[in-house]
Amino acid sequence: MDAETLTKIWTRLLADPEKSWVLFEHGTCVVLTAPEGDLAEQATELLREFGPVHVGSPAADFGVIDLKDAEGWVVTGHHQDVLTYVAPHEPHEPSEFAVGLCGRSKRDRDGGELHVVHVADGRHAPGVEV
């Protein structure tokens, strides 16, 4: 999935313009609850720590959120602010397990490659005090 499509999806999912978030190449989004400094660097540090999968550890755990109003799923992991989008065509079957493994795999790739494709800086949205 291309960066523009992923950006549109996450913009719709994280509709609050005051949210700051960073999107990585394979669909992993890091929501920054305390944004400061360079947002891409801040998100990269979080994903470097919480992106890679280590089997038998909390890093291998996942949860699946079915997007009722949008197509696809969001896969959660061991950090509440690291989320990965999985499109309907991506898992080999639409079971929760297959979707979760697909999302976990994408998060692992993003956590290793660390390629930022979009930064949404909500710190300067109307109504946000700096």
Image (cartoon, helix red, strand yellow):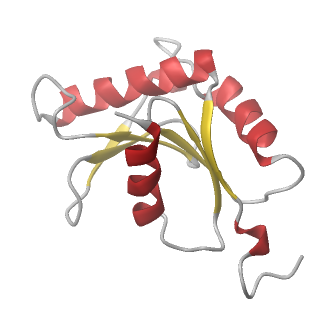
Looking at this view, name the residue that lies furthest to the top: 55
What is the number of callouts on the image?
0
Among the 4 quarters of the image, the one containing residue 61? top left
Looking at this view, name the residue that lies furthest to the bottom: 127
Q: Residue at x 52, y 26 (%)?
A: 58
Q: Residue at x 47, y 50 (%)?
A: 7
Q: Residue at x 42, y 25 (%)?
A: 106
Q: Residue at x 72, y 85 (%)?
A: 126
Residue 68 in percent (x, y) is at 19, 62
Q: Nearer the viewer, residue 62 or 28?
A: 28
Compared to residue 50, the image places residue 55 above or below, namely: above
Is residue 130 rendered to the left or right of residue 108? right
Compared to residue 112, the image places residue 89 above or below, namely: below
Residue 95 in percent (x, y) is at 12, 34
Quadrant where the N terminus sits is: top left
Is residue 67 rendered to the left or right of residue 84? left
